[in-house]
Image (tube, rainbow, N blue to C red):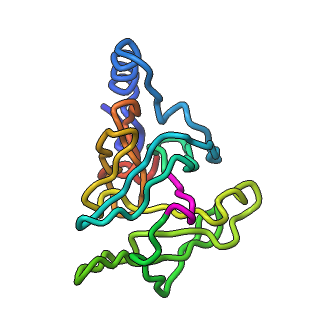
Amino acid sequence: MSDSLSPPSFDAEFAVTLWTMAGETESVWDYPRPPRLEHSEEHLVVSHGGQVIVDTRGAIRILETSHPPTYYLPFSDVDWTLLEPVEGTSFCEFKGTASYADIVIGDERIRQAVWWYENPSAGFSELKDFLSLYPGRLESCTLDGEVVQAQEGDFYGGWITSRIVGPFKGAPGTLGW
């Protein structure tokens, strides 16, 4: 019987083995904790309501054990006319205090869909002038042309593609991972 707070090791190992045999993959269980920053030249495009919110090849990936990568996108590649900063913050033990913005397209408002660190903590200073977003709240997020699957849960902003294998934190029963 498996503990609901622990990842199912046999299934995870079996899945990683199969996917690794099929080509290049990354297991989120090989990612470090505390998380690691990694610059990416992958092509990321985020759109909603017919508007491109960001189109970049200059992202930073955050890689953390049990989480699919979270992408931080350079401010310079974001259409800020679609964002409206809002009240409220949250705190990450690694990155510091996050600020939020709504995405506003026409009459539609996607609340607190975007966040950034105005003064990132030591070790994450490269996130200054980068933002992240929740892919599950938007119509289209692509990574090198592949449509991204959002990480489960309403707190995480991970981007799941065919080359990322889990299981992933965020689903019911994974809070204690």
Q: Position of residue 93 (x, y in %)?
A: 63, 62
Q: Which sits in the foreground, 73 or 25?
A: 73
The residue furthest top is 21
Q: Position of residue 39 (x, y in %)?
A: 62, 43
| Image position of 42 with respect to 93: above or below | above
Q: Which sits in the foreground, 67 or 5?
A: 67
Question: Does the magenta-highlighted stretch encompass residue 76?
Answer: yes
Q: Which sits in the foreground, 65 or 112?
A: 112
The residue furthest bottom is 87
- Name which residue lies at 50% across and 33% down: 29
| Image position of 90 with respect to 72: above or below | below
- Name which residue lies at 39% across and 76% down: 82
Look at the image and tell me in which quarter the N terminus lies.
top left
- Name which residue lies at 33% across and 16% down: 18
Left or right: where 75 falls relative to 55: right
The residue furthest right is 122
- Name which residue lies at 54% across and 31% down: 30
Question: Does the magenta-highlighted stretch encompass residue 54?
Answer: no
Q: Position of residue 172 (x, y in %)?
A: 29, 52
Give the extent of the magenta segment: 71-77
Q: Which corner quadrant of the image does residue 116 belong to?
A: bottom right
| Image position of 136 with respect to 129: above or below | above
| Count of numbered tags | 0
Q: Position of residue 6 (x, y in %)?
A: 42, 39
Q: Which corner quadrant of the image does residue 113 belong to?
A: bottom left
| Image position of 80 with respect to 43: above or below | below
Q: Which corner quadrant of the image does residue 148 belong to?
A: top left
Left or right: where 50 falls relative to 97: left
